Amino acid sequence: MKGSEKRLMQFMDGSNKRFIIPVYQRNYSWKLEHCKQLLDDLKSLINKNNTPHFFGSVVSSHMEGGNREDFLIIDGQQRITTISILLLAIIHLIKEGKVIPKKDSLSMQILETHLIDKYQNEERKIRLKPIKDDCDAFDALFSEGNFKDNSTITKNFTYFANRIINENICVDDLYDAICRLEIVDIFLEKEDNPQLIFESLNSTGLELEEGDKIRNYILMGLPSKKQDEYYYKYWVNIEKQTNFNVSEFFRTYLTLKLSRTVIIRDVYFTFKSQFSNKDINEELFKELLGYSYLYNKIINPLDGDKTIFRDVLYRLNYLDFSVTYPTILAILYKWKKGALSEQEVKKLLITIECYIFRRTIVGLPTNSLAKIFANLDKDASKLVRNDNVKYLDAFNYILLSKENNSRFPDDVEFKNELLNRNIYNMNSKYKNYLFSYLENRNSKEQIDVISKIENRTYTIEHIMPQTLSDEWINELGKNYKEIYNQYLHTLPNLTLTGYNSKYSNRSFSEKKTIEDGFKDSNLRLNQFIASCRKWGKAQLDKRKDELSKIAFKLWTYPKTSYIPTDLENSISDDDEE
């Protein structure tokens, strides 16, 4: 490894040099705030004569099978790309006559010294070659138009150009300041380990995410042809399947594989400790891609195949308990391999949903959940192997065996909290989910209740209002204070309405008969309310019974026929200490 200080423009100079960004690098991702800081620094340099400015390190190596002047940029691509974009902004402004340089040849000097090799035999003469998507946007900046407007490269180009014009920055002085940016030029020899060097660097710019580090790790050690092949065949698809949140996918994958929780900042080093260079082969890429397709069913449940369990996945996804993902991923993997039927998957997912929601209603802490769902599949699979029990029975048994803060709330506890706690002021996500599922239940004709609540088509309203009028006091009777205090924010006194909330304090009879009132409502939750002539304690208690019957059907307490033969070793000790 050779390292030396030099000016960035000196590094980028040279008639035959080409800079190739390897496919394992992330896309160009500098944000406007980073561009602002760079331009602010350069403006301050303009007034400091010959003062240099340190701009981080650039790590490069010769490209395997390439020319001697072809350099792979292992670290520093974000900064080199940004400076190239800024130089292109200067060139365009000069060509368009929007700025007048002191030196007539400035535009041509910048272009031919730092950006293109006009003697290159290939059709593409641009020196910097970003990865594919970035390359198209970057190359477009060398043309007269047809820019890729949605690209970060184009947005930053526009930002630089606008600031130069609006702040009347002298482009000659700006170029001089760019020429004073200093780097540590680190060149790797064949025997150097680029991954170890890459990990040890702390250059300026945008910090790498855990998924970026894993991508670099599993691709960097491969031959160049394999890098390109595996990147486009596997990695690009993994990114798409995970909604480009690869770090979270790998956290879920590793938690499942290791049966222990993995925190996000440890994902890369955990992966590296499990998969050495000799383990990185096409089979690993195939496995990761396969799991990413299953992960996509969790995070995009309504896309793709219409399985009978997609609605449960949708509800679980909305509840946003990502700690459950390792267990769900394991269940889907078993289903894909034919070990579980769609019906069994649906029952297992419903058990998870009921466990999560019952605990939420009861108000149990969530700190034990990560460990529970890290171990759940391993423990259930162990019982299947050792005791020849069905996976569903083993799964339910384990959750039903939890105690203390890890417990599965039973029907008595769940009913008491659901019908008597302050539902109106609970977390809106859980409240919306509750009313959506109570309304839709398992009907084939589903209403998108959550969207209608969020866009204010529906509101969650009190039947007995928060402010009691004389008419309401008379209707409730002499115990109106007791009824008000006991029932106001509870589920029996809440419903979905389509009428304007300004009517919320009206009498019960008016709420029934106004436009979009209870009488005209096509919502199931309002059928009992519409049948009532008045609203008081008797009606609230009757609605309690009605709602509890519905709730027990939706959030069922699971059953198991399994009786363990070895109580001590049947499940992991993951209850909260």
Image (tube, rainbow, N blue to C red):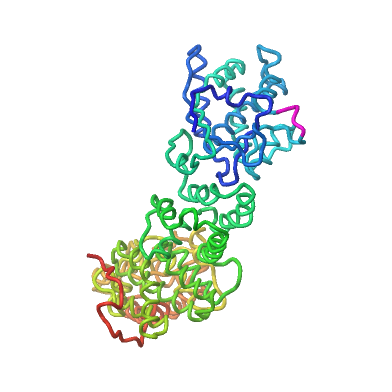
Position above or below: 391 against 216 = below
Position above or below: 127 against 179 = below
Q: Position of residue 576 (x, y in %)?
A: 25, 65
| 483 to the left or right of 142 | left
| 274 to the left or right of 130 | left
Task: Please state, as top left, top right, bottom left or bottom right, where the C terminus lies in the image.
Answer: bottom left
Using the rendered image of the protein, determine whether residue 543 is visible from the camera's viewpoint: no
Q: Quadrant of residue 230?
A: bottom right
Residue at 65% across / 11% down in the picture?
Answer: 102
Q: Position of residue 472 (x, y in %)?
A: 33, 69
Q: Position of residue 113 (x, y in %)?
A: 66, 22
Q: Quadrant of residue 83?
A: top right
Q: Main secondary structure of the magenta part?
A: loop
Residue lying at the far front in this picture: please name it. 191
**Is 338 one of the magenta-colored residues?**
no
Report the span colored magenta.
117-121
| 27 to the left or right of 361 | right
Q: Position of residue 60 (x, y in %)?
A: 55, 35
Residue at 56% across / 21% down in the picture?
Answer: 178
Position above or below: 96 against 545 = above
Residue at 44% across / 37% down in the picture?
Answer: 201
**Is 120 one of the magenta-colored residues?**
yes
From the viewer's side, name the closer residue of 62 and 73: 62
From the viewer's side, name the closer residue of 510 and 13: 13
